[in-house]
Amino acid sequence: MKYFWQILKEEYISIFSDPGILLILIAGLTVYAMVYPLPYSREVLKEINVVAMDKDNTSLSRKLLRWIDATEEVIIRYRVSDFEEAKNYVISGKAHAIIVIPNDFERKVLTRQQSVVQLFADASYFLIYRQVFTGVYKATATLSAGVEIRRMTAEGLTEPYARTKWNILNTDVRALFNPAGGYATYVVPGVLMLILQQTLLIGIGISTGTRQEQYEPLPVSQKTNKPIIFCIILARGFAYFSIYIFFPLFYISVIYRIYNLPQSGSLLELTLFLIPYVSSIILLGFSLCTLFVSRESSIPALIFTSMPAVLLVGFAWPLETLPQWLRIVSLLFPSTSGSAGFVRMNQMGASFYEVRWEWFTLWGLNLLYFTTAWLSFRLYHYRVKRKQLPSLSTQII
C-alpha cells in the first residue's frame, strides 16, 4: 500500500502539472462535450430550399405547391419556367431539389387518370434528400386523399364513410426513444462515449510519451529492486479512473439537460456499467504506451483511429451489416460495447440485466488489456534498462 499511494500521488502531480494533459483530459473533453451537440441542437432539418416548375399553372397545381411550401421540411424558394434554370439553382447550391408539375396535371386528376409529380432531389446529402422527399410526399398524399374523398362524396357517400373506404389500413407510427425523430438524440449520446475513449487514450499517450522521451525508470521495490508493475498499473490506473468516471455523470446531469436529450436510466446502474468501460480504456492506453516514443506521437496516432472507431461503434452504420470479421474486431474497442450498453440503458430504459453481455465483454477487455499492459510495462522497463547500460559503462571506464 505504501508503494500504491506514492505512485498515485506522483501520477496526480504528473497529470495536474502538465498543461498538455490537462488540456486534453479536462478542458478539451468538457469543451468538446459542450460544443459538439450544438450543430445538431435543432434536431431535424427544416425549410430546405427547393425550386418549383409549374407547367400546368392551374388552381390545383398552385394549391399543391402551396401545400408543399406549408410543410416544415421544405420551402419553395424559387419558381422558374425553364428546367435548365432550375438545374443551375441546384448545381450552385442555392436549392437542393426541383419539383416539376406536368402541364396536364389538373386535367388528368379531374378525369381520374394518374398524374405524376416529378421530384429531382439531391441524394448526395442523404439527410436533405430524406427531408425533401418526406415534405413533398406529405403534400401530394394529402392532396390525393382529398381529391379521392371529394369524388366519393360527390357519388353520394358520407364523408366519414368515404374517409374509411379510402384509407382502409391505418398506420400508427411512433418514434420510440427519439420523440423528436431528430439527429441529435440519435448521434450525440454515442459520440460522447467515443469522445470519452479517445481523449482518455490521448491523455495517457501524452503522459507515457513524456516518460519515454526522458527514459524515466519505473518505480522498483526496495526489497527486490524489480519494477512493481502490478502496483504501477493499479495506482496510475486509479488516478485516471478517479478523474474520468465523473465525465459520463457530467454528460447525464448537464449536457443532456442543456440539449434536452432523453434520459431514463438509473444513475446507480449506469455508474456500475461504466466502471469496466472506463477501466478498460485506461488499460488499453497502458497497453499502447510503448508505441508512443514522444508525447506528440500519441495525438496523430489516436486521432487516426477515431474514424474506424466511429464506424465500428454501430450508430453510423449498423453492426449487423458489417462483415463478420469486422464485428469481431469491433469488440476490441471498449467504445463498441460501452456505447451500445450506455445508450440502451440511458435512452431506451433497458435494465442492467438486459445489457449484461456488454458488461461481461467490457470485463473481458479489462482482463485482456491488463495482461497486455503488464507486457507493455515490462517492455518499457527493458528499453529503459538498455538505454542506461551505455552511460553506466562510460562511468566505470
Image: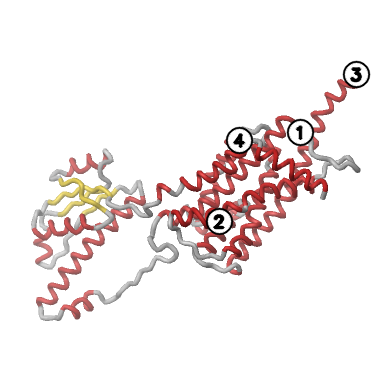
Q: Which residue is mark 3?
A: 397
Q: Which residue is mark 4?
A: 20
- Amino acid on which the number 4 mark rests in the picture: Gly
Q: CA distance from mark 3 to mark 1?
A: 24 Å
Residue linked to disc 2? 339
Among the two numbered marks 3 and 4 on one chain, the one whose residue lies closer to the N terminus: 4
From what the image shows, is residue 115 above or below residue 218?
below
Disc on the earlier residue, 3 or 1: 1
C-beta proximity under 8 Å, tags 1 and 4? no
Tell me the SS state at disc 1.
Answer: loop
User: Is disc 2 in contact with disc 3, using a CB cutoff of under 8 Å?
Assistant: no
Image depth: mark 1 or mark 4 in front: 4
- The residue type indicated by label 1 comes to Glu
Whether residue 90 sits left or right of residue 158 in the image: it is right
Q: Is residue 228 left or right of residue 178?
A: right
Tell me which amino acid carries mark 3.
Answer: Ile
Q: Residue at x 24, y 53 (%)?
A: 119
Q: CA distance from mark 3 to mark 4?
A: 40 Å
Position of the C terminus, as image quadrant, is top right
State the SS at label 2.
helix
Q: Residue 141: where, in percent of width, then height?
A: 23, 64
Disc 1 target residue: 216
Label number found at residue 25? none
Q: Nearer the viewer, residue 372 or 285?
A: 285
Label 3–label 4 contact, CB within 8 A: no
How far is the residue under mark 2 from the one under mark 3? 58 Å
Res 183 quadrant in image: bottom left
In the image, what residue occupies the spot 61% across and 32% down?
Answer: 296
Callout in the foreground (3, 1)? 1
Instruction: First in sequence, mark 1 or 2: give its number.
Output: 1
Its colouring scheme is: secondary structure
